[in-house]
């Protein structure tokens, strides 16, 4: 099957800065694909390469099998939802949504009808006559989404679209976006630095660092089997275990990772396990997260609500199933 | 810093600091408590200056235009009449008005066309020292005397000037000659034609058009241009649908400068151009040699009225909506 987007050894350098460095990537049609990474990791530049705002320094980009280098953004059937929405302040909501159809020469009645339908799709029917300045952040986000979707793009690019929304709105938008993507079947490429967002929404996730892809896989793969220390550290709050430690328990000199919820905290100091001291406690509602010091090694463990909770400074004994200790590909 | 050092410092200091001594200290406290007073102190001098001196003399001028001159004695009759305004509609005076307004409109249009690309470059591409260079390039001509620049242009545009020489070198003398042989815009040389007047007006007022457009374009977020392109608009469509409407307040602001400055100027057409008068020259002649202050005042009212209509039209067009 032709990939929706394919990068082959694609680089984008700005002078000495390698924003994107020899990236190979294939995004499947109809997939909800997330690009995850810290700021400056190259994920947004990758998105801009697909949109056509940036041209690769070397390597190639294909969109549904067609080479896209040198093709200006206005000739790509790809639309973007910008981070700060980029709505036209001088046009009302309806004309904003109908903009793409207008520049393609569609008649006024027809494009306004299509725009009204798109506004219904994002649950903003009847908002057409307002100016963007009169809308809330969440409503603007929906207008930006409608403005992109009304053109029926082959690929929809979303650049941290939920970043400016408050937590509650963000959660409901995550759900809506996911459902919309399923219903429309359009390929979504979603850039975010929020690992929770990437893992909960995407079919597959690419983790970026320093202009390179560290790992691509399903959210469970990324979460449970991180390939490198960076991925383990960045995706969720996994405990990264040094080779010496891992050798003691798994017999191999490799970096390892262990999820906080896989560590059991015992208050009985006579038992078998890793001795540690409680540094601080963070109440999370369903659980309490403990910051621990195990002979110089900083660890996190979660204790479910209701279980007996050690005090700050208390010495505890940690235990875990050895087969839950994940060995990373990265060499020691 | 240790925790002790921080708490130690707060132990010594009181929660409320003592009054600062002296007149300045109590003045600061007073102005802080009465912000209205500060505003009054800051605004009173300029308001007195503008309100009394400027508006006052403007009203005195307007009043003069309702007086008339006795044609035999040359004395001013202080009876209120519209006779002087009637004089404005004499063919010779109407010519002056039409000529000036046409010139002002053409100068404004040309300034906008020339200024836009410069302003666009400065607002969207120039960074660091290039931006400094842009400001310097735009402002530098404003630092030198207006008269020096106009006389320099007279030399450039003269029959023996550099422009004639350049056209000859490029074997384009026929082009210049055929332009100069055209009625109205032509003449013996560029320096004694309306074309010359037009060129110098555009040159002198250009900074007043560039700066407001640049300021307007600077406020257009770059991602709007990207968004337009992303949605399928060609660069031309992006200009028409996004850039131009958003730059319009700047263009209107700039055009207010170029239009009104051209309407009122009397030096440029006197040094460069034909012997036919512009409003500014007419005012100058009427209040000076002719001694007809009422007619001079009536002429002065013309640009004010025209600018009033211009602003009203611009507002109706929605030019200030994006402000």
Image (cartoon, coloured by chain):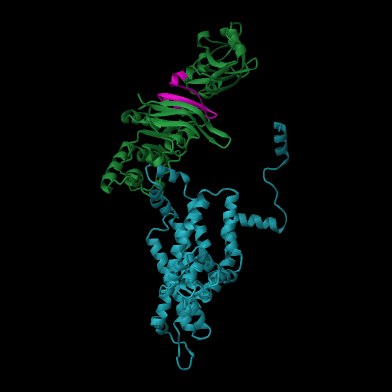
Chain colours: A green, B cyan
Q: Is residue A308 visible?
A: no
Question: Farthest residue toward the top?
Answer: A271
Give the image location of residue A282, x and y in percent.
Answer: 55, 23
State the image quarter where residue B178 is shown: bottom left
Question: Farthest residue toward the bottom?
Answer: B72
How many numbered discs, if any?
Answer: 0
Left or right of A107, for residue A156: right
Q: Residue at x 44, y 29 (%)?
A: A7
Give the image location of residue A216, x and y in percent.
Answer: 46, 22
Based on the picture, tell me whether residue A304 belongs to the magenta stretch. Answer: no
Give the image location of residue A182, x and y in percent.
Answer: 33, 28
Q: Which residues are magenta?
A: A195-221
Give the image location of residue B188, x and y in percent.
Answer: 48, 76
Q: Nearer the viewer, residue B108 or A87?
A: B108
State the image quarter where residue A40 is shown: top right
Above or below B101: residue A208: above
Q: Is residue A238 visible?
A: yes
Above or below A118: residue A299: above
Q: Quadrant of the C terminus of chain A?
A: top right
Q: Nearer the viewer, residue B21 or B221?
A: B221
Based on the picture, tell me whether residue A202 belongs to the magenta stretch. Answer: yes
Q: Residue at x 45, y 79 (%)?
A: B298
Q: Residue at x 47, y 56 (%)?
A: B116
Q: Quadrant of the N terminus of chain A?
A: top left
């Amino acid at each position: 099957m032709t990939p929706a987007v394919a990068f082959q050894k694609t680089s984008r350098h700005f002078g000495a800065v390698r924003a994107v460095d020899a990236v190979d990537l294939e995004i499947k049609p109809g997939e909800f694909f997330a690009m995850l990474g810290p700021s400056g990791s190259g994920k947004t530049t990758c998105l801009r390469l697909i949109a056509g705002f940036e041209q690769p320094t070397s390597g190639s980009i294909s969109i549904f099998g067609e080479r896209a280098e040198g093709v200006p953004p206005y000739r790509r059937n790809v639309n973007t939802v910008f981070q700060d929405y980029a709505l036209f302040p001088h046009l009302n909501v309806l004309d904003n949504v109908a903009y793409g159809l207008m520049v393609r020469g569609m008649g006024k009645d027809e494009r306004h009808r299509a725009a009204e339908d798109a506004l219904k799709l994002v649950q903003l029917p009847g908002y057409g006559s307002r100016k963007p300045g009169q809308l809330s952040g969440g409503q603007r986000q929906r207008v930006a989404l409608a403005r992109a979707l009304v053109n029926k793009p082959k690929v929809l690019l979303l650049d941290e679209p939920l970043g400016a929304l408050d937590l509650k709105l963000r959660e409901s938008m995550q759900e809506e976006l996911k459902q919309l993507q399923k219903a429309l079947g359009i390929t979504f490429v979603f850039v975010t630095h929020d690992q929770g967002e990437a893992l909960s929404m995407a079919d597959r996730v690419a983790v970026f660092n320093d202009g390179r892809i560290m790992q691509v896989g399903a959210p469970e793969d990324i979460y449970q089997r991180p390939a490198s220390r960076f991925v383990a550290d960045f995706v969720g709050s996994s405990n990264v275990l040094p080779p010496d430690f891992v050798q003691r328990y798994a017999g191999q000199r490799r970096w390892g990772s262990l999820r906080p919820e896989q560590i059991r905290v015992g208050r009985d100091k006579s038992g078998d396990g890793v001795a540690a001291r409680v540094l601080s406690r963070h109440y999370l509602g369903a659980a309490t997260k403990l910051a621990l010091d195990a002979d110089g090694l900083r660890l996190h463990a979660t204790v479910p609500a209701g279980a007996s909770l050690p005090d700050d400074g208390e010495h505890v004994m940690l235990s875990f199933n050895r087969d839950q200790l994940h060995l990373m590909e990265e060499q020691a | 810093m240790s925790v002790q050092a921080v708490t130690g410092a707060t132990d010594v200091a009181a929660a409320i600091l003592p009054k600062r001594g002296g007149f300045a200290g109590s003045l600061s406290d007073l102005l802080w408590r009465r912000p209205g007073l500060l505003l009054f102190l800051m605004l009173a001098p300029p308001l007195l200056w503008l309100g009394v001196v400027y508006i006052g003399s403007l009203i005195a001028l307007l009043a003069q235009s309702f007086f008339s001159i006795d044609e035999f004695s040359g004395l001013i009759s202080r009876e209120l009449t519209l006779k002087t305004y009637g004089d404005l509609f004499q063919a010779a005076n109407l010519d002056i008005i039409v000529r000036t307004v046409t010139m002002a409109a053409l100068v404004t249009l040309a300034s906008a066309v020339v200024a836009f690309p410069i302003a666009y470059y400065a607002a969207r591409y120039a960074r660091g020292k290039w931006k400094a260079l842009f400001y310097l390039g735009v402002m530098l001509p404003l630092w030198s005397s207006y008269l020096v620049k106009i006389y320099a242009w007279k030399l450039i545009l003269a029959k023996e000037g550099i422009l004639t020489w350049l056209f000859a070198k490029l074997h384009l003398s026929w082009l210049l000659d055929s332009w100069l042989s055209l009625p109205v815009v032509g003449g013996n040389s560029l320096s004694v034609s309306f074309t010359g007047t037009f060129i110098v007006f555009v040159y002198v007022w250009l900074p007043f058009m560039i700066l407001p457009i640049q300021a307007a374009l600077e406020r257009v977020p770059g991602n709007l241009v990207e968004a337009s392109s992303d949605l399928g608009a060609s660069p031309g469509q992006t200009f028409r649908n996004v850039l131009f409407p958003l730059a319009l307040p700047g263009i209107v602001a700039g055009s207010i400068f170029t239009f009104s400055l051209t309407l009122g100027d009397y030096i440029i057409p006197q040094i460069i151009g034909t012997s036919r008068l512009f409003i500014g020259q007419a005012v100058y002649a009427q209040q000076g040699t002719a001694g007809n202050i009422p007619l001079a005042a009536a002429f002065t009212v013309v640009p004010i009225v025209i600018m009033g209509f211009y602003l009203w039209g611009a507002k109706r067009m929605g030019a200030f909506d994006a402000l």
